[in-house]
Image (tube, coloured by chain):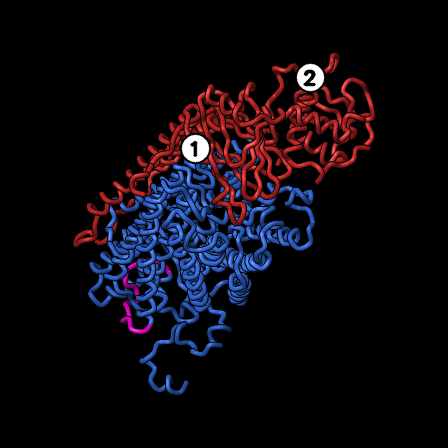
Amino acid sequence: MWLNFDLFPDSASTLSGRVDQLYFFVMGVTAFFSLLIAGLIVTFFLRYRRRHGNLFGSAIHGSIPLEITWSVIPLGISLFIFVWGAQVFFALSRPPADATEFFAVGKQWMWKFQHPEGHREINELHVPIGLPIKLTMTSEDVIHSFFVPAFRVKADVLPGRYTTVWFEATRPGRYHLFCAEYCGAEHSLMGGWVVVMEPNEYEIWLAGAGTGQTLTASGEEIFTQRACNTCHRLETQARGPSLNGIFGRRVALKDGRMVLADESYLRESILNPAAKVVAGYDPVMPTFQGQLSEEEVLSLLHYLKSLAPAAGDSALPAGARPARTMRDRGAS
Amino acid sequence: MTAIAQAPPAVRPDYLNDGYGVRSWLLTSDHKRIAILYLISVTAFFLLGGIFAVLLRLELLTPQGDLVQPDTYNRLFTMHGVTMVFFFLIPGIPAVLGNFLVPLMIGARDLAFPKLNLLSWYIYTLGALFTLLAIVMGGVDTGWTFYTPFSTSYSNTHVILTGVGIFVTGFSSILTGLNFIVTIHRMRAPGLTWFRLPLFIWSHYATSLIMILGTPVIAITVLLLAFERAFHVGIFDPALGGDPILFQHLFWFYSHPAVYIMVLPAMGVISELVAAFSKKRVFGYEFVALASIAIAVLGFLVWGHHMFVSGQSVYAATIFSVLSMLVAIPSAVKVFNWTATLYQGSIWYQTPMLYALGFIGLFTIGGLTGIAVAALGIDVHVHDTYFIVAHFHYIMVGGTTLAYLGGLHYWWPKMSGKMYPEFWAKLSALIIFIGFNLTFFPQFILGYLGMPRRYHAYPEEFQVLHVLSTAGASILGVGYLIPMVYFTWTMRYGKRCEPNPWGALGLEWEAATPPPSHNFDQIPVVTTEAYDYVGQATRQLLARRTAGGAAESSAGGEAARG
């Protein structure tokens, strides 16, 4: 135990260095002020100890200039830290537009991952370096939290909605994956590894890991199996609205609201279709609550995202499609 | 009665010898006796919470979960949190020291509502019994934060019973806060204006505001939780149509201000100690006083900093981050003013002062690491790790508990009429300081390394730091046991102390030691500001010059009235 002993975590993502710089700065401020206060206490301790001729203190009431000084300086420093912290946070929260989407499902007490190519993994996630990865996550039961210390990223994983986390690994290696939100008996065992590989090794791994269907293909299969396509026909108007280019579009609802068709909206419309009915349609769709696993819903979403806008659809241009999630929308 | 009448000088009547039976204690409405009842209760819960902590630290000595089952471990950390937070830290200083001292310090004969005060102790005890029952029946495993939907739909432990305990105990907090606010407004001695009040009173006033405004919210939250758990009404569980983040908002709306319920009274104690042992007015008195109010108000606006990675919007997170930074300002103002008070003081190193100086140092570290976790970019990484555990233990153990012990030593002569043994007290203060730092400093490093909290087993590379932490906890445990032994010992065998062993100013030192049941034979009239040590010394000097030796003592007594 005494040999395998670290004081600082591995740094293996594009943003981990930025988090560390901020951390070092704040720890520097902490050390400076702690030592300042401790130094003053010790100095006064020795200099003004009670002795004959010094049985009561001086008549000092206070000093407005000093009060202003030690209010304004901490205010300036803490606001500086706030701005810096917010910048890092925005970088951590906003995946680049070209990020590749992976999926994760947390459940008591394991992590299930899906690669866009269709590979599934449990408690282990293989990723190549240099590829920005956006992980869209949900939980089957309680709240979990996806935490990879080496990447300095963490995001809670909630039942009933999607959250995201993104990272771009920079150094090959095996890094701890933890569940950071207490989730019951085996919480401390709900972890695993993120295996970061050189891109060519990753290709070899992908090839050797057996081929599943791609997520889009399995999503399409479910779409047909569940007969979604009888109403949501792709080219023509039918009993359900067309789903071409649906993702990222603004949708007018029957009650007059406009909503953004993001992951959470699509998920809700599959599981609880009556909640938000599109303008011009009747609430005739049956619920799929309890009939689809979270992985199946994710495959469906992936399929829906792959549907290109049909000609004449007023979808946002692909480049302007915001990588928005509920984290941005204040969904709480 | 007749025996006393025959030998009047032998026993001066005080609140301790005013009746001896169990009834005279359990039916008392004397704020000082109620303080002692609370002292006994919170000490019992501190011991209980401490036993849980010992078991937790022993389990964490090795990476494997080998001492207890995972289920047991989860119950242990939950019950450690519940007992320490709701039954020791929140009532600790206000209900023990506050109950004893608020009337004495403002020259009143009791609190405004003495019977409500007794009722608050009974409510506390009832809540405590529910919680103890839950513990005896097997405990609860949700963490003291009771996050949904785990607590409502997944845990199969005694969540509702524990919730009832917390719900009930909350009312004792509300009654105490109400009592303090009315007392401080209505019952100050003649001449005791707001800006002549001891800072202990200011901080208890600020605390009371939080108790009254915040506690109902936790009561509602616990009620909703129990409702969902018992009747499957969808409030928090998404499977039932609820929102789990809503629970976190409600929970932290109380539980963040609750941190200030724990630390504001501690700050009040420190102001008293620093003044008394520097023989000097607290530097920038008005700023220290108003900083308490500022902390109480700002404390209600920062709850969302517990939820930066919970799925709340990034804009909400940004607002909560900047508001959290603002709390640092009044806290820094206090620390700088205490430190400046020492300048040109007459510093007397008795045990209470050692605790006060320890508090200032540890609170500084706790507060500054609070800035680290309020900074969004850092919090994403350290949230729910040992960094957080270390941070809040620096505030609650290094801060609140040190102040509580310092205050207990300072006012122990007043409360018991007996002096504690100085050597043992200094030794235990030193042991606690060393043990505390050894326990919690390694946890900052562990947290940044990525060790998540509430882990029963952990990767091997974290072991060295865990071993250091457990070693520190053992030292800390010894440090706590020593005062428990000598305080108990002094009750029986301690020598009677002087009425004012510290030569301190303040109305509580003007009352007899220990005070009689009615506190003051004559309600004092206040003519000077608080901590007027220089004024007192000047008046003593003048009196000595103008009058002979005979007048000296009475002038001294007169001056002390300031």
Q: Nearer the viewer, mark 2 or mark 1?
A: 1
Q: Residue at x 81, y 20 (%)?
A: A237
Mark drawn on residue A175: 1
| Residue B496 among magenta residues | yes
Q: Earlier in the sequence, mark 2 or mark 1?
A: 1
Q: Colour of chain A?
A: red
| Residue B508 among magenta residues | no
Disc 1 crowd, CA 10 A, few/some/many (<14, 14-19, 20+): many
Image location (x, y in percent) of residue A305: 66, 22
Q: Colour of chain B?
A: blue
Image location (x, y in percent) of residue B230: 66, 55
Q: Kindly identify which chain the residue marked by label 2 belongs to.
A: A
Position of B191 compared to B185: left or right?
Answer: left
Q: Which residue is mark 2?
A: A308
Image location (x, y in percent) of residue B247: 60, 45
Q: Amino acid at mark 1?
A: Tyr
Q: Amino acid at mark 2?
A: Ala
Position of A200 compared to B545: left or right?
Answer: right
In terms of depth relative to the viewer, which is nearer, B341 or A315? A315
Does A143 sit above or below residue A152? below
Give the residues drawn in magenta, as a range.
B492-507
Number of numbered discs: 2
Does B37 sit above or below residue A92? below
